[in-house]
Amino acid sequence: MSSNKEMSKRQARKEQMRRKERSSRLIGIGLIAFGAIFIAFLIIYPMFKPVGDVVTVPPVERPSSSFNTAGDPNAPIQIEEYSDFQCSFCRLFHQNTEEALMQSYIANGSVYFIYRSFGAFNSAESGRAAEAAYCAGDQDRFWDMHDTIFANQTGVDVGAFSDRRLLAFAERVGLDMDDFRSCFNGGKYKDRVEQDSKDGVEAGVRATPSFVVTYTVNGETKTRLIEGAQPFTTFQQEIETILEEIGQ
């Protein structure tokens, strides 16, 4: 009799262990399924998340603009801006100084101005925004895209310049979307954006915005570096000093 009782107890324990194992397996499968669903949500949600409103701004007059440049290529002074579309100080320069510089020294042929990115300086969104601007340049709308990107700056790596947002900017600017997508999705200007960063570092750029000023005196090429979102008066002083040095 006692032997039967012991067998019943063993069977009960085995059944209890089987139930625990089955329960553990179900919990494990549930956790794996939940994790897979969560990961899928993280991947899929950005594709359907509303892009939000796109801010537009009046165009800035840029004399003799071509792709990412403005002014006369034969001007005695060249200014290369190294910038980052996610950089708040770069936006300040664009808002507070750039137009005055265009009107005062680029329009009269004294300065040739070139905009260059500083690669993915702040994050990957910076690089993608620069690629988008260059792709817009293929349709002679670089500066329109440039202004629209800055107008929609909201912070660093917050999704303001996700690929979907940049496509929305391109549509708002009025680009041929088939051509733009081919350029942007194909990474046509990825290498160029990376080269921008390398060239900037070689020129002594450490942060954005920075401006490499180049001019020639008696056959000797000279450079100056202006760092930060300086007011127009700072650029005016530097340019006037250089013009005096080269006798203009």
Image (tube, helix red, strand yellow):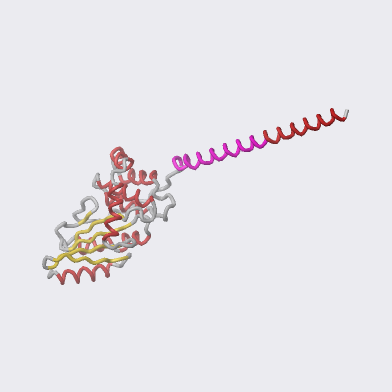
Residue 168 shown left or right of residue 111 in the figure: right
Nearest the eye: 72 or 104: 72
Q: In which quarter of the view is residue 31 placed?
A: top right
Furthest-right residue in this view? 1
Q: How many marks?
A: 0
Q: In which quarter of the view is residue 77 placed?
A: bottom left
Q: Does the magenta portion include 36?
A: yes
Furthest-front residue in this view? 3
Q: Give above or below for 42 relative to 195.
A: above
Dominant SS type (magenta): helix
Identify the residue shown where x is 81% and y is 32%. Answer: 9
On the image, the x and y values in percent for residue 133 come to 30, 49
Q: Which residues are magenta?
A: 23-48
On the image, the x and y values in percent for residue 100 come to 26, 63
Q: Give above or below for 33 relative to 232.
A: above
On the image, the x and y values in percent for residue 45 come to 48, 41
